C-alpha cells in the first residue's frame, strides 16, 4: 500500500508508454516487501534538465533513462560510473547526497543474460551485426570480457570502422575489424562464430526481415544472440537454427538491465527465484 514512506523510482524518456519496466520493478518491490513504486514519466524534448533536477528535489530514489536521453542526460549528473563513461550512455540514475550518479545496466544486463543462457564471450570469435548505440556498447562489453576477435558487420561500413577503431584504441591492439554486411563471405569458412544481432532489423512489425538472409552466413554461426525481444523469435533466430546453431532473444537482457538497476536502488540482491517471478511478470505484460 502506498503511504507516507513510499519511495519512488521511475523511467524518463519519450515515449515511455510501451515500457515493460513497471512490470519488472513493481513485481520485485512487492515480492521483496519493499515500500517502493515505479512510475513512467514522459519528458518532452527540451525539459530533460528540469526533469532530472525535479526528480532529485522530489526525493526520487532512482530513475531509468530511455530513448532519446541516454547520452543527453550525462551533463546533468553529479557522477558517472566508469563503465557508463566508457560506453557514453546511461540508463540508470541512482540518488546520491548531492545529485544523481549515472550507470549503464544494459551491458551488465546483457552479460548476466548471456551467463544465464550459458553463452560465453571469453575466447570467442564474435560477429557483431550493427553499428548503432547498442552495438557500440556491446563491442566494449566484448572487449572487457576478453573476446578473442570481434568482426563488426554493418550496412554502413564506415560506422563499423569507427567503432572498431575505438575498440582497438581501448584494447591497445587489433582486436576488432569492420566489414560491410555482404562481405561476411570473406570470413574463413572453417570458423564458427558467436553472432550478436544488434541491428533494428526484424523488430515488430517487420518480423519477416533479417539483416542477412544467406544460409551460407548462418552455417558459420554456432550461437546467434538477437538483442530484439519483440517478436520473441526473430527471423534471424530462425535462420540461425536452420543453420544448425543455437538462438537466444533479447528478453533476458531487458529483464536483467532492470534487475541490476533495482539492485543499485535498493542494495538488495535479487535471487534466482525472484528473477524468474519478474521474468514471468514482464512476459505477461508483453502478452507472451
Ligand atoms: P540504432 O542506433 O538506431 O542502430 C540501428 C542499427 O541497425 C544500425 O547499425 C543500422 O545500420 C542497422 N539497420 C537499421 N535498418 C537496417 C536495414 N534495413 N538493413 C541493415 N541494417 C539496418 O539502434 P540501437 O539503439 O543501437 O538499437 C539496436 C537494437 O537493439 C534495437 O532495435 C533493439 O531491438 C535492441 N535493443 C535491445 C535491448 C534489450 O534490452 N534487449 C535494449 C536496447 C536495444 P546503419 O548504421 O547502416 O544505419
Image (tube, grey):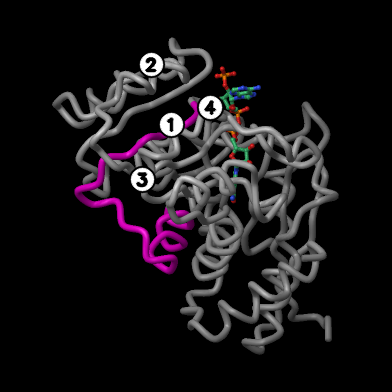
Relative depth, front residue between 111 and 213: 213
Q: Is mark 4 within 8 Å of ligand 1?
A: yes
What is the number of the mark on residue 194?
3
Say which residue appears at 62% left-offset and 87% top-offset. Answer: 32
Q: Decide which of tag 1 and tag 2 comes sooner along the chain.
A: 2
Q: Earlier in the sequence, mark 2 or mark 4?
A: 4
Q: Which mark is residue 132?
A: 4
Mark 2, other Cα within 10 Å: few <14 / some 14–19 / many ≥20: some
**Circle 3/circle 4 CB separation < 8 Å:** no
Q: Position of residue 131 (x, y in %)?
A: 48, 25
Which comes sooner in the sequence, label 1 or label 4? 4
Spatial CA span between label 2 and label 4: 11 Å
User: Disc 3 to disc 2, how far (Cα)?
Assistant: 21 Å
Q: Which residue is mark 1?
A: 216
Mark 3 CB in 8 Å range of ligand 1? no
For the N terminus, the quadrant is bottom right
Q: Going from the N terminus, do you reach mark 3 or mark 4 first?
A: 4
**Mark 2 in CB contact with mark 4 (< 8 angstroms):** no
Question: What is the C-alpha distance between the residues marked 1 and 4?
Answer: 25 Å
Left or right: where does residue 169 sit relative to residue 104? left
In the rendered structure, find residue 117 and report the number of the disc placed on it.
none
Amino acid at each position: 500500500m502506498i503511504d507516507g514512506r513510499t519511495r519512488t523510482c521511475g523511467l524518463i524518456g519519450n515515449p515511455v508508454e510501451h515500457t515493460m519496466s513497471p512490470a519488472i520493478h513493481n513485481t520485485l518491490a512487492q515480492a521483496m516487501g519493499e515500500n517502493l513504486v515505479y512510475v513512467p514519466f514522459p519528458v518532452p524534448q527540451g525539459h530533460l534538465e528540469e526533469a532530472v533536477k525535479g526528480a532529485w528535489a522530489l526525493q526520487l530514489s532512482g530513475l531509468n533513462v530511455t530513448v532519446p536521453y541516454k547520452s543527453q542526460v550525462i551533463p546533468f549528473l553529479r557522477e558517472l560510473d566508469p563503465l557508463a563513461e566508457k560506453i557514453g550512455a546511461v540508463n540508470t540514475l541512482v540518488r546520491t547526497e548531492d545529485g544523481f550518479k549515472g550507470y549503464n545496466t544494459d551491458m551488465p544486463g546483457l552479460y548476466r543474460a548471456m551467463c544465464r543462457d550459458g553463452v560465453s564471450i571469453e575466447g570467442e570469435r564474435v560477429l557483431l551485426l550493427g553499428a548503432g548505440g547498442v552495438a557500440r556498447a556491446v563491442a566494449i562489453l566484448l572487449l572487457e570480457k576478453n573476446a578473442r576477435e570481434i568482426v563488426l558487420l554493418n550496412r554502413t561500413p564506415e560506422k563499423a570502422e569507427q567503432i572498431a577503431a575505438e575498440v582497438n584504441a581501448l584494447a591497445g591492439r587489433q582486436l576488432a575489424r569492420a566489414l560491410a554486411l555482404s562481405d561476411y563471405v570473406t570470413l574463413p569458412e572453417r570458423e564458427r562464430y558467436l553472432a550478436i544481432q544488434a541491428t533494428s532489423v526484424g523488430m515488430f512489425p517487420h518480423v519477416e526481415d533479417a539483416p542477412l538472409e544467406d544460409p551460407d552466413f548462418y552455417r558459420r554461426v554456432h550461437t546467434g544472440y538477437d538483442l530484439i525481444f519483440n517478436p520473441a523469435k526473430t527471423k534471424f533466430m530462425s535462420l540461425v537454427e536452420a543453420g544448425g546453431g543455437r538462438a537466444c532473444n533479447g528478453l533476458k537482457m531487458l529483464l536483467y538491465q532492470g534487475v541490476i538497476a533495482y539492485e543499485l536502488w535498493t542494495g538488495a540482491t535479487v535471487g534466482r527465484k525472484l528473477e524468474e517471478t519478474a521474468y514471468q511478470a514482464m512476459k505477461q505484460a508483453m502478452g507472451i
